[in-house]
């Protein structure tokens, strides 16, 4: 929703005419009309008055962004980031375990290979 559409929506929800809103803000009905048509924009002081009048932050008024939603989203992103970080640490730990198991398996195979070779060469295991 554009800023001018937001102004129209907020004014209508309060059941105000352009003239009534203009009176509350100290501007003419024509000025409010120009804001709502997107032909001009309120100056900073009027933006502050609008945000106070509609009981919302400037971000919410101008950008249509609820600061509480942004904070919640940031918390969610932090939690997701933490989950991904934990997952990456888990993957790294699994890789290390697999490497240790691979090394241990190789050591066992080498040990058995040496036993078989020793048995064959010494005549201990495979006697003819």
Image: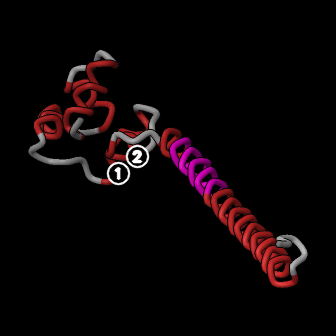
- In which quarter of the view is residue 10 placed? top left
- In which quarter of the view is residue 4 placed? top left
Q: Nearer the viewer, mark 1 or mark 2?
A: 2
Q: Is residue 70 left or right of residue 12?
A: right
User: Against 56, is 79 above or below?
Assistant: below
Q: Residue at x 39, y 42 (%)?
A: 65
The residue carrying pointer 2 sits among few (fewer than 14), some (14 to 19) or many (20 or more) residues within 10 Å by Cα, namely some
Q: Residue at x 40, y 46 (%)?
A: 58
Mark 1 element type? helix
User: Against 114, is 77 above or below?
Assistant: above
Q: CA distance from mark 1 to mark 2?
A: 11 Å
Q: Residue at x 58, y 54 (%)?
A: 84
**83 or 19: nearer the eye?**
83
Please give the residue where the numbered disc 2 appears in the rendered image. 58
Colour mapping used in the image: secondary structure
**50 or 78: nearer the eye?**
78
Q: Is residue 9 left or right of residue 60?
A: left
User: Against 113, is 88 above or below?
Assistant: above
Which residues are drawn in magenta? 72-87
Please give the residue where the numbered disc 1 appears in the rendered image. 45
- Quarter of the image that includes the N terminus: top left
Q: Position of residue 31 (x, y in %)?
A: 15, 39
Q: Residue at x 75, y 67 (%)?
A: 105
Q: Position of residue 12 (x, y in %)?
A: 26, 19
Q: Which mark is residue 37?
A: none
């Amino acid at each position: 929703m554009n800023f001018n559409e937001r102004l129209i929506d907020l004014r209508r929800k309060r059941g105000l005419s352009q003239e009534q809103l203009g009176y509350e803000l100290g501007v003419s009905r024509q000025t409010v009309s120009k804001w709502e048509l997107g032909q001009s924009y309120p100056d900073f002081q009027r933006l502050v008055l609008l945000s106070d009048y509609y009981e919302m932050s400037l971000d919410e008024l101008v950008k249509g962004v609820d600061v509480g939603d942004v904070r919640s989203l940031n918390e969610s992103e932090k939690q997701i980031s933490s989950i991904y970080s934990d997952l990456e640490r888990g993957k790294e730990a699994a890789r290390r375990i697999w490497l240790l198991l691979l090394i241990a398996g190789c050591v066992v195979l080498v040990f058995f290979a040496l036993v078989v070779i020793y048995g064959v060469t010494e005549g201990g295991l495979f006697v003819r």
